[in-house]
Image (cartoon, rainbow, N blue to C red):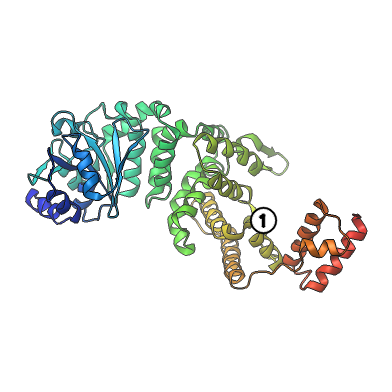
């Protein structure tokens, strides 16, 4: 990728945002820095912009230009202000000293290029343009990680999202040597970067790098028990091995289902955590020569819940991830020649709108365990998943109606209380199973239920 500074200046000057800033009177210099220049060099449109000012009072002028107030961001090592304008998001810092010194303090060389908007000048103090041309992620100086350990995760996130980029060998070694420093970083910042890795196109290589550098086990130390189990028992794909390998299939399989990024992220986290309980539930049947992990999903849920609390997951995210972990064996259990329509309906009405997510999770689990190979077992799970997805789509077109209400039960003689809820749930279960198909049948069942249980 041949890059000439005059061509870069021309591309920068064409940006609407740059034109607006260039036409406005500032008392000092205003620099565009960071990822926006990288994105333009890669022929992509920036989603947000980093600006560096030489005069504090120009922050007020930016507010006036974009007609929005700024607010200070927390949890960042350098004081940063954010302006949410109609056109874009701006993160603004005030430079103390020369802009070249500011660039050397930045995370990666590819993000350490500056454009002096007022003077139409590109400043490349650390070889960022050349590194973008070589598609390499490199830090500007060895102190980069120590000054902000989150940069270890950011490096892997960029590696996961930027096509055909590689991580500089010295940077990789530094991450492996400095991995413990991630514990100094606020949980919210760690989760933000992990969120982006999980949904990145190259998530498999990102997860692999987290594993190889040891950073994964600093963030989620609970996974190390699975690594030890793999080593002790000589496992290849039974526990952690198949989890890491399964990320190879996440995006490809999602193309068949079409989850949005939020749900895909939930699947990714659920998949990362789904077998945590295997380290506590391992057993070996000597007579059959078989390995078992009975009820491991329940233990996995408990461990995953603690991890997500530590990493500040939202309650909504936790519920979704835990639901996937709880049910991650269900499709496997019904994938056989005796699969019934009733079993499929029960699964759909249990998982509701998370049914497609469970399918993606199951298929990643399956191919992670088979090393990506197809066999009779994978074909059976594939067929069942296809039937489930078709039945789910049909259920959206014609959802099951509620046949009776709590008021109906009270009119039959039920007393208000838990018994009403129990009866409604029983009716609903039988309706899902096809045993109750209309209101009259539901009322008949409710009368029987009342007579057998009493009020």
Q: Can residue 291 be seen from the camera position used here?
A: no
**Depth order, front residue of 153/213:** 153
Horizontal arrangement in the rendering, residue 279 relative to residue 454 (left or right): left
Circle 1 crowding by C-alpha within 10 Å: few under 14, some 14–19, many from 20: few
Q: Position of residue 367 (x, y in %)?
A: 51, 54
Judge whether 16 appears above or below 313 on screen.
below
Residue 284 placement: quadrant: top right
Q: Position of residue 446 (x, y in %)?
A: 85, 64
Residue 197 placement: quadrant: top left
Quadrant where the C terminus lies? bottom right
Judge whether 315 appears above or below 449 on screen.
above
Q: Position of residue 114 (x, y in %)?
A: 16, 41
Horizontal arrangement in the rendering, residue 313 relative to residue 199 (left or right): right
Count the marks: how many?
1
Q: Residue at x 82, y 73 (%)?
A: 440
Q: Residue at x 25, y 52 (%)?
A: 46
Q: Can residue 87 be seen from the camera position used here?
A: yes
**Depth order, front residue of 280/418:** 418
**Depth order, front residue of 384/264:** 264
To which residue does mark 1 refer? 333
> Which secondary structure lies at badge 1?
helix
Horizontal arrangement in the rendering, residue 406 relative to residue 380 (left or right): right
Q: Position of residue 131 (x, y in %)?
A: 19, 42
């Amino acid at each position: 990728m041949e890059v000439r500074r005059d061509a870069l200046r021309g591309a920068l000057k064409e940006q609407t945002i740059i034109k607006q800033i260039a036409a406005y009177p500032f008392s000092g210099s205003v620099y565009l820095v960071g990822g926006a220049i990288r994105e333009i060099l890669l022929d992509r449109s920036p989603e947000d912009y980093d600006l560096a000012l030489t005069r504090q009072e120009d922050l007020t002028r930016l507010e006036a230009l974009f007609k929005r107030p700024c607010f200070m961001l927390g949890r960042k090592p350098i004081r940063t202000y954010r302006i949410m304008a109609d056109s874009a998001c701006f993160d603004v810092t005030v430079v103390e000293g020369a802009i070249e010194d500011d660039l050397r303090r930045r995370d990666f060389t590819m993000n350490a290029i500056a454009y002096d908007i007022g003077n139409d000048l590109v400043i490349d103090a650390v070889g960022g343009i050349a590194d973008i041309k070589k598609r390499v992620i490199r830090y500007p100086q060895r102190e980069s990680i120590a000054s902000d350990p989150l940069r270890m995760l950011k490096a892997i996130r960029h590696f996961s999202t930027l096509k055909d980029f590689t991580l500089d060998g010295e940077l990789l070694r530094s991450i492996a040597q400095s991995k413990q420093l991630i514990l100094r970083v606020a949980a919210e910042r760690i989760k933000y970067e992990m969120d982006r890795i999980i949904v990145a196109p190259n998530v498999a290589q990102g997860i692999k790098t987290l594993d190889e550098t040891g950073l994964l086990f600093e963030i989620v130390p609970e996974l190390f028990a699975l690594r030890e189990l793999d080593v002790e028992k000589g496992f290849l794909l039974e526990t952690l091995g198949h989890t890491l390998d399964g990320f190879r299939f996440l995006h490809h399989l999602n193309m068949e289902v079409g989850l949005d990024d939020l749900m895909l992220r939930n699947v990714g986290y659920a998949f990362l955590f789904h077998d945590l309980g295997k380290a506590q539930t391992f057993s070996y049947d000597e007579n059959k020569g078989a390995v078992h992990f009975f009820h491991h999903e329940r233990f996995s849920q408990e461990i995953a819940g603690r991890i997500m609390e530590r990493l500040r997951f939202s309650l909504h995210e936790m519920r979704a991830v835990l639901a996937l972990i709880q049910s991650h064996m269900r499709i496997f259990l019904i994938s056989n020649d005796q699969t019934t329509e009733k079993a499929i309906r029960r699964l759909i009405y249990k998982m509701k709108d998370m049914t497609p997510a469970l399918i993606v999770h199951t298929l990643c689990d399956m191919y992670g365990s088979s090393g990506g190979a197809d066999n009779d077992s994978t074909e059976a799970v594939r067929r069942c998943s296809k039937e489930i997805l078709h039945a789910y789509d049909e259920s959206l077109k014609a959802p099951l109606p509620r046949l009776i209400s709590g008021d109906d039960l009270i009119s039959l003689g039920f007393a208000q209380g838990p018994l009403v809820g129990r009866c409604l749930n029983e009716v609903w279960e039988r309706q899902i199973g096809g045993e109750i198909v209309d209101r009259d049948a539901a009322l008949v069942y409710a009368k029987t239920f009342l007579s057998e249980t009493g009020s």
